[in-house]
Image: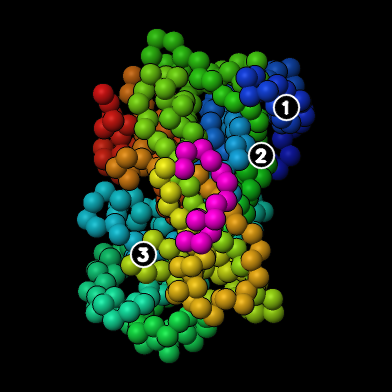
Amino acid sequence: MGGWGDAGVSRGIDIVARRVSMGCMGITALTWARTAIGMGWGMAEMIVIGGGVVGQSAAYQLARGGVAVTLIDRADVGQATAAGAGIISPGTGALGAGPLLPLASAAVAFYPDLLAHLAEDGETDTGFAICGGLFVATDEEEAAQLPARFRAIEERRAAGLRNIGTVAILDGREARRLFPPLADIPGAIHLSEVGRVNGRLLRDALRRAATRRGATLVEGSAEIVYSGGRATGVRVAGREIAADAVIITGGAWTNRLGEALGVTLPIYPQRGQIIHLDLPGVMTGKWPVILGSHSHYILAFPESRVVAGATREHDSGYDPRMTAGGVHEALGEALRVAPGLSGATLHEVRIGLRPASPDGLPILGALPGLDNVFVATGHGPSGLQLGPHSGAMVAGMAQGRAAGLDLGPFAATRFAK
């Protein structure tokens, strides 16, 4: 079956809104099915399961290439993309010399093309901006480590890693000039090309662009149908959609899809609680991202919004609640680093259940034992930096293209029992 074509309005296609049962979940969801006249809702060349930024990127990549694609999403509360504050800063991350460094390098190099393609499709509101970053030292011990950190960042820049830019060591006064709420810190490293992105806006832009290109969106709980070592389609809302290939991008819920297929995908939810603050009348849009030797961060969005986070709770289970301890941790760390935020208005707390793996690496590529099922998940706290590229890369693999990277360290087979 050919693609829907790349016109903004697909000819011969009806948009049908259906109320469907979600089986044992006992709830009703609005399902959007885009069906070709005379063909019925039951065929697709590719099916993507999971509607976070990874799945939306995969669906967009396929739809843009003229492939008929259906994306199925259960719209679970706690989806990580909806809560995430995307920091594009591979130069400051603890990537070491391991497999994450080439993956991160490819991921940040992918962003300009992705944003350009979205703009061609009329989507420019992603919250992406190059705002710079400050890697701060909050005491003299951390300040003593800045020269070594500076050299490591420069080595990455020399190796071609993007989103670093000009690198300079600043004193506390210079750092506060860039981010006024900062404490009286001894120093910081400034990177001029650190970026940030709004996860919700990027996800929604990808979704709209994919549907304009002909993608089908279905809300419901998916069950992969397989026989003889191949997936034949996906069952959702009592209907079966045939497919040539299936891509699993189920986030923190991926493990359950793996269990149904007899494949070990030990993804678990890591809860992150993220504080959103308002500073009425303050122009925050050009403030740099604040990073450091800890896992917490502060970043600003236009206009007058500051985001501080985030907890990394490995024992939360699928519990998307805001907790007193989580808010205390995120807010306390933010005010320790930037006490000038103490007068800000507490706007909201967002909760995301990140897909985490036991070894901290994503799971990418083909599933063992199934010729045409692929997976992209497990990005943990780096989903918005790594996820768009991972989704597009695995979508290409589902079409028979090479990944362009050594995916051995990310293969699902590393967890085989």
Is disc 1 placed on a helix, strand or loop? strand
Mark 2 crowd level (few <14, some 14–19, many ≥20, 10 Å Cα): many
Is disc 3 placed on a helix, strand or loop? loop
Quarter of image, res 346: bottom right
Q: Furthest residue to the bottom?
A: 173
Q: Which disc is residue 211 wearing?
A: 2
Residue 316 can be seen in this image: yes
**Residue depicted at x 67% and y 54%:** 122
Amino acid carrying label 3: it is His
Badge 1 is on which residue? 28
175 in relation to 155, above or below: below
N-terminal of the two: label 1 or label 2?
Answer: 1
Amino acid carrying label 2: it is Thr
* Residue 397 in picture, x, y percent from top left: 40, 34
Q: Quadrant of the C terminus?
A: top left
Q: Are circles 1 and 3 on residues that touch, CB within 8 Å?
A: no
* Residue 171 in picture, x, y percent from top left: 36, 87
306 in relation to 62, above or below: below
Q: Furthest residue to the top?
A: 228
Is disc 2 placed on a helix, strand or loop? helix
Mark 1 crowd level (few <14, some 14–19, many ≥20, 10 Å Cα): some
77 in relation to 201, above or below: above
Badge 3 is on which residue? 294
**Residue depicted at x 46% and y 55%:** 311
